[in-house]
Image: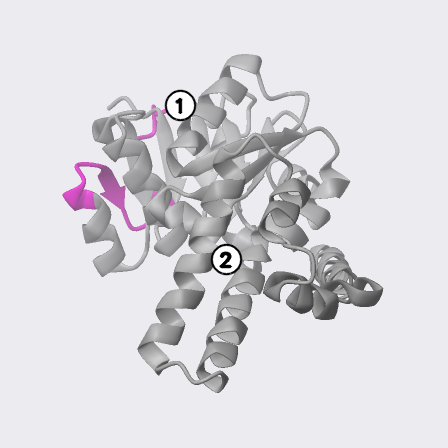
Amino acid sequence: MTIRLVLAGCGNMGYAMLFGWVGSGKLAAADVFVVEPNEDLRARAARLGCHVGASAGDIATDAVPDLVVVAVKPQVIRDAVSAYKRFGDGRTTFLSIAAGTPVATFREILGERAPIARCMPNTPAAIGKGMMVVFSTPLVPAATRDFIADLLSASGEVAAIDNEGLMDAVTAVSGSGPAYVFHFIECLTAAAEKAGLPSETAKLLAMQTVFGAASLAAESREDPAVLRRQVTSPNGTTAAALDVLMGGDRLKTLVMEAVEAARLRSIELGR
């Protein structure tokens, strides 16, 4: 059995990434072994055509995968990764998508020879609109870095950082960021309802406005600040609203405080 990639954990995020890899043709299902204790989740992966097992012990003894993707909850990392010690001889790279778990933890479990990379995805990866940020240790071969970037691109945009300490900032911005946007949609919907719009109409206006504005910002060559000014007529309705949001850097200060709170919590969880 030739196994190119082992996926350890196939919950919502793991399966979403796997579905993107196989569906896009970036990885053949037959080259993947999924380790998932939950029978229903394991069956879901099997339906894609992947090899599956309930534990790492089910992987063939002669298998030497290029990559082991660790997609389990941070609180079970030590027990889960310990089962893959036999791949820690330097031939297999480990890619973790577990938030807040530093490379040092993997080195402690797998040994100093193991090439290790960390990835912080976010929930829009489930629909191919995610933001994936990767940190790789020097032991990760260039070809494997390219392989990882290509796989992750099936789930959205990919960026790399060369300082692991920045992962806490990444977590605070793009990892937790979707929740900030969802809450803004909630707030805009509530404001629309208060202004008299029916509930369903208010929700549609809020969601589509955020979606459309984000899409325009992503596709435009203009800086978001320029796009904002283009919408804002002097003494108009938008200007009146922005006086509230931008007066005294009100919204900017609040967002900075929120991101800093998330960053500090990420550091705390990683200790």
Q: Main secondary structure of the magenta part?
A: loop
The percent coordinates of residue 105 (x first, y second) are 67, 45
Q: Considering the numbered disc 1 on the image, is that residue within a helix, a strand or a loop?
A: loop
Q: Considering the numbered disc 2 on the image, is that residue within a helix, a strand or a loop?
A: loop
- For marks 1 and 2, the one nearer the N-term is 1
Residue sticking out furthest to the right: 248
In the rendered structure, the answer to whether residue 152 lies left or right of residue 52 reads right
Question: What coloring was used for the rendering?
Answer: one colour
Magenta stretch: includes residue 206: no
Q: Which image quarter holds the N terminus? A: top left
How many numbered badges does the structure rendering display?
2
* Nearer the observer, 71 or 201: 201
Magenta range = 46-66
Q: Would you place residue 205 above or below residue 178 in this image?
A: below
The percent coordinates of residue 10 (x first, y second) are 34, 50
Rate crowding at label 1 as few (under 14), some (14 to 19) or many (20 or more) other CA atoms within 10 Å.
some
* Nearer the observer, 136 or 63: 136
Magenta stretch: includes residue 56: yes
Q: Mark on residue 73?
A: 2
User: What residue type is disc 2 on?
Assistant: Lys
Rate crowding at label 2 as few (under 14), some (14 to 19) or many (20 or more) other CA atoms within 10 Å.
some
User: What residue type is disc 1 on?
Assistant: Val
In the rendered structure, the answer to whether residue 200 lies left or right of residue 82 reads left
Q: Quadrant of residue 162?
A: top right
Q: Mark on residue 64?
A: 1
Q: Quadrant of residue 271?
A: bottom right
Q: CA distance from mark 1 to mark 2?
A: 24 Å
Identified at 54% across, 75% down, the residue is 187
* Nearer the observer, 234 or 48: 234
